[in-house]
Image (cartoon, grey):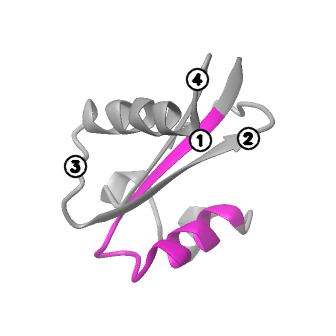
Amino acid sequence: MKFYKFVIGSMDSFQSLDELKEAVGSGENLEKIGISKSQGNIGIFEYEIESLSDQVALMYGRGLAFSRGWCMDDTFSFCQEVDSITNNIF
């Protein structure tokens, strides 16, 4: 089994995919820099799957996000393999 994190953010809050990755990867408290789930501008989904490929993991992450109301329109998103799950679904 592998652990993954799928992150999706609104283009209203992030100017680029790199900016989204930097905000999530910086370790800063996202709410401290004005990013919050309550504003609906970011979603972070952690999951464990037996993935045959990174593409399958990406599709799984998109499924989680889309089932919670997100879509591809006007968003940036990425999926990355992580060492463990923190249960920090945002």
Local secondary structure at mark 1: strand
Separation (CA) of disc 2 from disc 3: 23 Å
- Residue 15 is tagged as none
Q: Which quadrant of the structure image shows residue 3?
A: top right
Separation (CA) of disc 1 from disc 3: 17 Å
70 vs 38, nearest the viewer:
70
Q: Which residue is found at the position 39% from the left and 83% from the top?
A: 15
Provide the residue designation for mark 2.
82
Provide the residue designation for mark 4.
52
Labels 2 and 1 touching (C-beta < 8 A): yes
Q: Residue furthest right?
A: 83
Local secondary structure at mark 4: loop
Amino acid beneath label 3: Cys
Residue 89 drawn at (x, y percent) = 54, 37
Q: Residue furthest bottom?
A: 15
Q: Earlier in the sequence, mark 2 or mark 1?
A: 1
| Quadrant of image for the N terminus | top right
Q: Which residue is found at the position 61% from the left and 62% from the top?
A: 24
Magenta span contains residue 11? yes
Q: In this view, does 34 lie to the left or right of 59?
A: right
